[in-house]
Image (tube, rainbow, N blue to C red):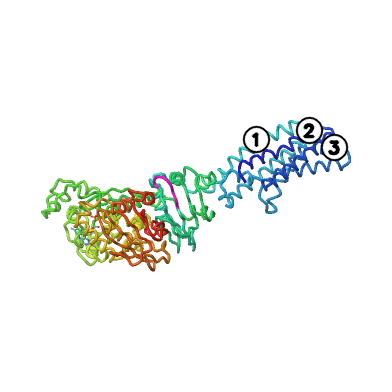
Amino acid sequence: MKPKLKTILFITSFIPVIVFKVVARVGDATLAQAKVATVVGLMLAGIQFILSKRFVKHTTYLEKTFLGFLGFGTAWVYLTPVHVSSLFVDHSTALLYFALFLTTFIPQLFGYDPFTYAIAKQTTPEKVWNTPHFRTINLHLTYFWSVIFFVNFLSSWLGHGKPLFSILIPLIIILGIGLPVVKIYPKYYLKRQFTSQSIDPSLIPDTAKELILRMPMGFRPEAADDLKAEIQFDLSGEGGGKMVLSISEGKCSFREGDSSSPSLTIRSPADVWMKIARQEINRAQALMDGLYEVEGDMNFLMKMGDLFRPPTKAKEEDLTQKGEKKMKILAIQGSPRPKASNTEILLQEFLKGAQSQGAETDTVYLKEKEFHPCLGCYTCWAKTPGICVFKDDMPEILEKVKGCDILVYATPLYNYNMTSLLKAFQERLLPLLDPHLIKMGEIYRHPQRYKMNRKMVLISTCGFPEVSHFDALRHVFRHIERSGQTPLVGELLMPGGELLKQHGMKENVQGVLQTAYRAGIEVIREGRVLEETEMEIQKPLVPPDALAEMANLWWDSHLEGITQGKPVQGKIEDMRLLLRGMAASFNSQAAGDLKATIQFEVTGNQTGDWFLSIENGKCAYHEGKANSPNLTIKTASEVWLAIANQEMDGQQAFMEGKYTATGDISLLMRMRSLFGAKKS
Ligand SMILES: Cc1cc2nc3c(=O)[nH]c(=O)nc-3n(C[C@H](O)[C@H](O)[C@H](O)COP(=O)(O)O)c2cc1C
C-alpha cells in the first residue's frame, strides 16, 4: 500500500468517532441523541471499514477499534434498559479509551502484530520489520500506550465525563507524554543496545574501504562459532567500493569485489558508514532511518557488533595498572629508497597496528641521516667510553635507541643480508657495548654498557619468491639476539616484495598488510609476534613461477623502453605485465567451475595478441591467439591500460566504443570479480 493512502486512511479512521462525539454533543447528550450518534458513527465506521478493505485491502487497528466500539455502543443504547444504556451515554469517552486500551493490550498476547506496528512500518524501511529489535521496540511502545489509555479511561470514568477529565487531561497525557516518548524511545533503545565500547575516533581509518579492510583484525572467532558467511559491502562515494568480508572456520578475510552468494549485503554511502564507525550515528538507528540499505539476513547485521571488536587502544592507565608503561618503538629503516620502499609498506602497517595498542612509534630513515661508517678506532670504548669520535647524526639516534622498548630493524634483503646502510648503522652501535669479554651461558660476549630491556623485531622484503633467501639474514639476527641480550620477538619476512606495489596485486597485498598490522598489535598485546602471523607473511602472494614470469616481463618491458625510468607506484605500463598480473590475481572463488578463454587483440603502442585461459579454478596467461575464445576484446593498449590504472571507466569506455568485445559478453561483466580489484 502506498504511504499516502495509509496516511489518508489513518486520518479518516477518526472521522466516525469525531462525528459520533459531535452528534452526541460530546459528553452532554440525551439518550435519544446518543442513539442517533451511535448509529451515524457506526455507519461511517462501517463505510470506512468496507472502503479500506475493498480498495486498499487493508484495515487498521484503529478502524477495527472504532467500528467495534460504535457497534457495541449501538447495541448497548438500543438493546439495554434505560438505566443501563444511560451508562454508555454518560461514559462514552471513558469507554472509548477502554476500547483503545484493549486494542493495545490484547492482540500481541495472541501472536498478532502489536498496535504500533502499522504506524512504525510507515516510518521504517521494510527490511527492518522482521528484526527482533523492531518487534521489541513496538511491543514496549504498545504496552506504553496501554498504560496511557488505561489512565485516560480511569480519568474520564472517575471524572464523570467532565471535559477536564475526559478531554483535557487525556489530551495532555497523549500529546505531552505519549507522542514524545514514541519519538524518543526507539532511538534510546537502539543506542542502549548497540553502543558498546566507546571508540577513539583517532583509531578510525580515513576511508570506509580501509575501515572494512581492518575489520578482520577485530574479528572474534569465539562469537562466530562455526559461522560460514559472506558480507558484501557496496559503499558508494569517495573512499568506498565493493568489498567482501568472508567468514569461515573461525577466520575472517577481506577481498575487494563481489560475493556470489552473500549472506548479507550492505549498501551505504561511504560517509554514512564512516559516521557509524565513529559512533556519530547509531548503526541500527541509521538503518531504521533509511540512511543505508541491507539485504539478506538482518539478524546477522545485528550480530555484527559481537562478531567484530572495534579498534581499541590500550589505555595508558590500563598499562600502568598492569605495571607496564607506554611502549616506545623505534624503527630503523635501512632501505636506500626510504619512503618509496617495499619494506616501508610493511613497516608502517606494523607500526600502525602497534599504535592502535597505545604504542609510541618513531621511524629513522637511515638514507636521510648523515652518519659515517665505524672507523674501528675504539675511541668509544677506551678514550671516551660510550662516545664516538664522529659528531654526525648518530649520537641523537643512539639516545633514541637507549630509550626505546622495541627496536625494529627494517631492511630490504641485499645480497642475502641487510643493506649496507643498516649494517653501517649496526656497527655504529659499538658505544652501547662494554669492551670486556664476559662469558654468558655458553659463549663470551660484550655486555651492554647501559641498563636496558630492549626487544627486537626484524622486518624485511626480498625480490625472490622463496623465503629461504632470508636464511643468512635470520642467522645474523639470531646471533645479534644471543650476543646482545636483545630478544628477537618478531620476524616479518616477505618474499616477492616487489608485488607490494603491483597494482594488479592489490587484493592479495591487502591480506599481507592486514597481517603486518596484526603483528603490530600482537607485539604489544602478547609481547611478541605470533608464529602463525610470521608464517602468514612468508606465504608467497603468487606461485614462484608466476612471480618469476611477471618479474621477467617487467624487466623485458623496461629493457624495451615500455616501462620508462622509475616505476610509478601502482601503475601498470605494459600490456603483457597487466595480463600476466590478471592471471596471477585470478579469483578462483568467484570463478567457480568456469571454463573460458578470453582473447585480447591489442593495437596501439603495444600491439600483440594474448589470451587468458580459465579452467579448474586457475587462470593461465598465453601469448598468441586462442583457438576458439569465448570472449574477444579488441582494444588499444592505451585504453586497456588506462582502465586497469583506473584512469578510465571500463563500462563507459565500452559504451563509447573505445574497445569492443565479441562473444560471451557476460564474461566481460564478470571480469571485475574474476580478476580481483582491477577495474575492467
Ligand atoms: C643491491 C641489491 C641486492 C639485492 N639482493 C637480493 C637478494 O640477495 N635476494 C633477494 O631476494 N632480493 C634481492 N634484492 C631485491 C630486494 O631485496 C627487493 O627488491 C626488496 O623488496 C626491495 O626492498 P625496498 O623497496 O624496501 O628497498 C636486491 C636488490 C638490490 C638493489
Disc 2 is placed on an element classified as helix
Does the magenta-highlighted stretch encompass residue 169? no
Q: Position of residue 44 (x, y in %)?
A: 75, 39
Q: Amino acid at mark 2?
A: Val
Residue at the spot of label 1: 175
Q: Earlier in the sequence, mark 1 or mark 2?
A: 2
Q: Amino acid at mark 1?
A: Leu
Disc 3 is placed on an element classified as helix
Q: Quarter-wise, where is residue 407 in the image?
A: bottom left
* Mark 3 sits near ligand 1, with its Cβ under 8 Å away: no
Q: In this image, 354 relative to 340: left or right?
A: right
Disc 1 is placed on an element classified as helix
Instruction: Decide if residue 482 is in sight here.
Output: no
Spatial separation of the CA atoms under disc 1 and disc 2? 25 Å
Label 3 CA crowd tier, 10 Å (few <14, some 14–19, many 20+): some
Q: Quarter-wise, where is residue 584 in the image?
A: bottom left
Instruction: Decide if residue 388 is in sight here.
Output: yes
Q: On the rendered image, what quadrant is the C terminus found in?
A: bottom left
Q: Is residue 195 above or below residue 553?
A: above
Spatial separation of the CA atoms under disc 1 and disc 3? 30 Å
Q: Which numbered circle lies on residue 23?
A: 2
Residue at the spot of label 3: 86
Residue occupying image coordinates x 65% and y 35% = 175
Q: Position of residue 139 (x, y in %)?
A: 64, 48
